[in-house]
Amino acid sequence: MTVTGGVRVARRECRRVWVGRVAVGGGAPVSVQSMTKTPTADVDATLRQIAELTAAGCDIVRVAVPSQDDADALASIAGRSPIPVIADVHFQPRYVFAAIDAGCAGVRVNPGNIKRFDDRVADIASAARDRGVPIRIGVNAGSLDPRLLAKHHGKAGPEALVESALWEASLFAEHDFHDVKISVKHHDPVVMMAAYEQLAAQCDYPLHVGVTEAGPEFQGVIKSAVAFGVLLREGIGDTIRVSLSAHPVREVKAGIGILESLGLRPRRLEIISCPSCGRAQVDVHRLTEQVAAAFEGFPAPIRVAVMGCVVNGPGEAREADIGVSSGNGKGQIFVRGQVVATVPEHRIVETLLDQALALTGTTAGPSV
Ligand code: SF4
């Protein structure tokens, strides 16, 4: 049960798996994942990107394993990564075993892309069980098992995605292997939401939620935020990945932002800024960008209000920890509802920052 703003959200009850030290499902906090976009065989570049993702707050990272060189790099990467590493395997079952041997914390398989997957499940389940490695069954609309696609008249709709996932999970269950999480991704958030809702009702495996191929950053964040918002509000979803045609750090920031907006993760920095209008007496957009940049990485949770005039300015500024209500080339600075200073426009940002540091008792400046 999560309580946010006095609203209770019941999380779906499900099994728990452990991806290294990160619990997924069974009431664990919703974790944020991303995927490196470097050639995995380039160990140094991949570890550098993992370090960037870790600094951004990523909980679990996935790396692609399309070749033997990539498989050979897994031991170095998994052994030196500060966060659990999941190997992403398509087509070649031998890389599943390589990933498990290399010490990866999890393996994602796409059974629809693995020939004679049914025949390999016993061996995969046995190897994964021996090393305590969970398997993600990652069903994608673009790579459904051809047999299922034919059965559903070539349409990878919610029913086909769910049937595929449950059938593949049942193959593992036949070998008494239940250390499984599932994803049923589609590029269309409406189809994807329907698939996850159906899946959630029919199994108790933890669910990895994602809109696949969500697109460039602006579109992808909107699609993901809409779909994740609906599902997480219904209690569905145990780990998330925002898939963007952008740097993976942007995926992590988006994922964390979605969880913060839903009250599923404490907010670190919230900026309440007005959209501006004809009444504004300051360039609100520029001021907001300056405040956001100045507070990036602020060392304590804080809510900052940036308001363009006196209509809503003082009210919102009072509700925040720190706020400014602008007008006539000046900014009235609020701290916890009290006016503490009136400063010229060019000193608004530095005054907000100074007051925030004093309020939170943090002596160091923002870390970024
Ligand atoms: Fe317009 Fe003032 Fe409201 Fe900003 S606070 S949107 S400037 S009325």
Image: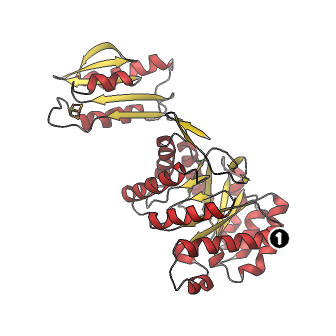
Query: How far across and down, in percent of the image, does residue 297 sit?
Result: 47, 34
Residue 39 in view of the camera: no
Left or right relative to 85: residue 240: left
Q: Quadrant of residue 166?
A: bottom right
- Residue identified by numbered label 1: 175
Decide: is 300 above or below 30: above
Q: Quadrant of the N terminus?
A: top right
The correct choice, above or below, for 117 with respect to 98 in the image is below
Q: Quadrant of residue 309?
A: top left
Q: Is residue 298 visible?
A: yes
Q: Ligand 1 quadrant?
A: top left
Q: Nearer the viewer, residue 363 or 47?
A: 363
Residue pictured at 60% horizontal, 58% vertical: 208
For label 1, being within 8 Å of ligand 1 is answered no
At 50% from the left and 49% from the top, the residue drawn is 255
Q: Quadrant of residue 291?
A: top left
